[in-house]
Image (cartoon, rainbow, N blue to C red):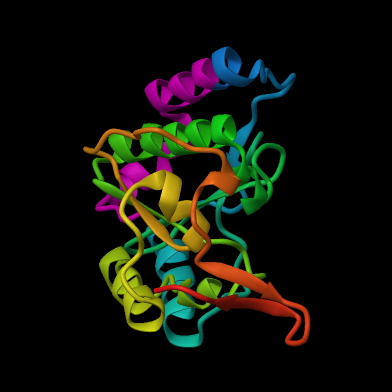
Amino acid sequence: MGHGLNFDQIKNLNQDVSLWNSLANFLKSERNYQPTEPYKKWTKEPTPKNLNEFWTEIETQGFSDITLYIDCYFGNITIFRKTIKIWFSTIFYSYDFFEHSKDTIQIINIGRIFANHIGTDKILYIPDGYVKTAIIEDYSCSLEDVISKGIRNFGEPPKGISKGRKNYFFVDYIDKEIGEIKEWDEEEDFWKWDDEEKEYIQIKI
């Protein structure tokens, strides 16, 4: 998701009581998930100097040797200059969770808690590597630029979350209703596994 946070807001994000209480309450009520240690800590002090060094390496090299993110009880949160990446490791640790209607709604709602808190209006969802749409991942530019790159490479993503998740590249506009989330097999396919090529190929744009 995109962001316009300043240095102080970035530094204090792991201590924002409103945000983390909202997340904790949602996870408790919707997934009965209550970690014994709900930690949320920076791996490195997010000073303006450290952040700028990290961002500059990402923007010039495409990667960084600096480990700088919020390590938390459900995964980690990396704040780039213009975007934020949320990565789950203990819950929703695979794009496969989008194959289940209830999980899909929960993932979208967690994303919206973050988005509403930081004041952004859209969230991009793509898988982590195993489908070609992962190539649009780029933290050196704005979210709008990444979405445009995805459209150039794979066409306009389907409207709506239920259909969009099967495209392995979709945008959640948080001012829209989540709408009905059908069972995975009830939605049309946009990608299909090719046994000969050993990869997913796009079958509909």
| Nearer-the-camera pick, 171 or 138 | 171
At horizontal 56% and vertical 39% (from top left) the residue drawn is 183
Quarter of the image holding residue 200? bottom right
Which quadrant, please, contains the C terminus? bottom left
Q: Position of residue 37 (x, y in %)?
A: 71, 23
Residue drawn at 58 percent across, 45 percent down? 184
Number of numbered labels in the structure image: 0
- In the rendered image, residue 201, in percent from the top left (x then y), is placed at 59, 78
Q: Is residue 137 above or below residue 178?
A: below
Which span is picked out in magenta?
A: 1-26
Q: Nearer the viewer, residue 85 or 180?
A: 180
Q: Residue at x 45, y 75 (%)?
A: 136
16 within the magenta span: yes
Residue placed most toward the observer, 57 or 152: 152
Q: Is residue 169 visible?
A: yes
Describe residue 31's horizontal placement relative to residue 153 as left or right. Answer: right
Residue 156, horizontal then vertical, whole percent: 31, 69
Q: Quadrant of residue 204?
A: bottom left
Classify residue 148 as left or right of residue 28.
left
176 horizontally vs 46: left or right:
left
Residue at (24% x, 38% y) in the render: 176
Label the magenta part by its dominant secondary structure. helix
Q: Position of residue 45 (x, y in %)?
A: 53, 51
